[in-house]
Amino acid sequence: MLSQMSVTRRIAASRRFLVLACSAAALAAGLAAVAAPAPAAAQGAFGGYDDDRLYQDQNGAIYRKRAGQYVPYSGRVEGGRPVGPDTAAAPPPPAQPRRAALPEETDADQAAISARTGTRVVSDATKAALARPLDDGPIDYAKAYAAIPDDAFPVPAFNWKKANPNVLRQEVAYNGRYEPGTIVVDPKAHQLFLVQGNGRARRYGVGVGKQGFAWSGSATINSKQAWPDWYPPKEMIARRPDLARQVDKLQSGVGVAGGSRNPLGARAMYLWQDNKDTLFRIHGTTEPESIGHSVSSGCIRMINQDAIDLFGRVNVGTKVVVLN
């Protein structure tokens, strides 16, 4: 007969398995035996995936990992494992060192992004943003920070003449250890570097988390959105009651719709770590005067024109390193 402690341990172990290994299976019908061993046919029988595990985001959507990316899974599930082919969309291409071509996102891609991030995707705006040409010529501040009237929402000019030169976009020498295509954020210097080849990097000024809200570590860009909705966490609204007057009821919760008054600005890149949304983003801002300071609730904010420039140069899957 098992002791009470042994029974308790077995129950705890079973619960951990359900949460970590096959929580996604609980959403599929007919999975009474979710802790059963994986069928032999599920073990690598359907190529193209990194492993035979399923992943679940905060909205209950199910994914598989392919080429390091998380793609929706719509196939059959048995014993908490994928079985048989599925109709998931192909993942976006891996990050490229420099100026990789970005595919036009389909409606299915947009739906997947919305499920992963919990925010509404402005489909037309995101597609237009992906198609916006890059300026690879010498950086001309008058041009780089001019008004952008032809975006989904107009972007006002940034007064670069009155800004600290350290926060302005620059091409600089880079001799660090990170490979081309990596984003490196130095919170102390309030700068973000997009590492390029030939010992160079594209540098931008950023605003970072104030004391108590700073974050560091490695993550990947899980999705990109133009003019995203913003859904402040309940904890933030509790800290700042004034936010209650700014938010509205949107399709995915209480927040601020994408647009000129949205705190995420013109672009947002969503950071995930260990298969989970970190809730941190690299994004534009409605407060460009805050760039170069530690004022945010942890996110990395940029001048809108710089966020637009960076958005066009990186792919989903790009590695992001925030230094400690």
Image: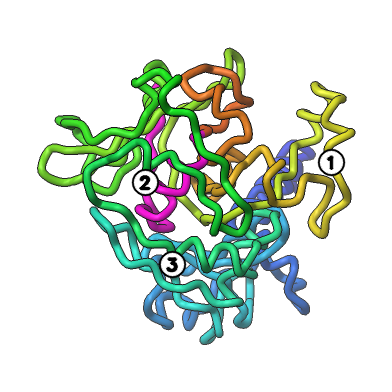
Question: Which residue is disc 1 drawn over?
Answer: 247
191 lies left or right of 105: left
Distance of label 3 from label 2 (alpha carbons): 22 Å
Among the 4 quarters of the image, the one containing residue 179: top left
Residue at point 38% right, 42% down? 144
Instruction: Indicate which disc residue 319 carries.
Output: 2
Q: Does the magenta segment cover residue 236? A: no
Q: Nearer the viewer, mark 3 or mark 1?
A: 3
Q: Are marks 3 and 2 in contact (CB under 8 Å)?
A: no
- Give the quadrant of the C terminus: top left
Q: Nearer the viewer, mark 1 or mark 2?
A: 1
* Amino acid type, callout 2: Lys
* Residue 95 vertical placement versus 6 (above, below): below
Expressed as whole percent of the image width and height from the top left, the position of residue 46 reads 43, 82
**Mark nearer the N terminus (3 vs 1):** 3
* Amino acid type, callout 3: Ala
Distance of label 3 from label 1 (alpha carbons): 30 Å
Most foreground residue, 1 or 269? 269
* Residue 21 vertical placement versus 248 (above, below): below
Q: Are marks 1 and 2 in contact (CB under 8 Å)?
A: no
142 lies left or right of 235: left
Q: Does the magenta segment cover residue 320? A: yes
Q: In what element is the residue under mark 1?
A: loop
**Mark nearer the N terminus (3 vs 2):** 3
Q: Residues within 10 Å of mark 3 (few under 14, many from 20)?
A: some
**The magenta stretch spans which residues?**
302-324
Q: Nearer the viewer, mark 3 or mark 2?
A: 3
Distance of label 1 from label 2 (alpha carbons): 32 Å
Question: Which residue is disc 3 drawn over?
Answer: 131
Q: Say how the picture is coloured.
A: rainbow
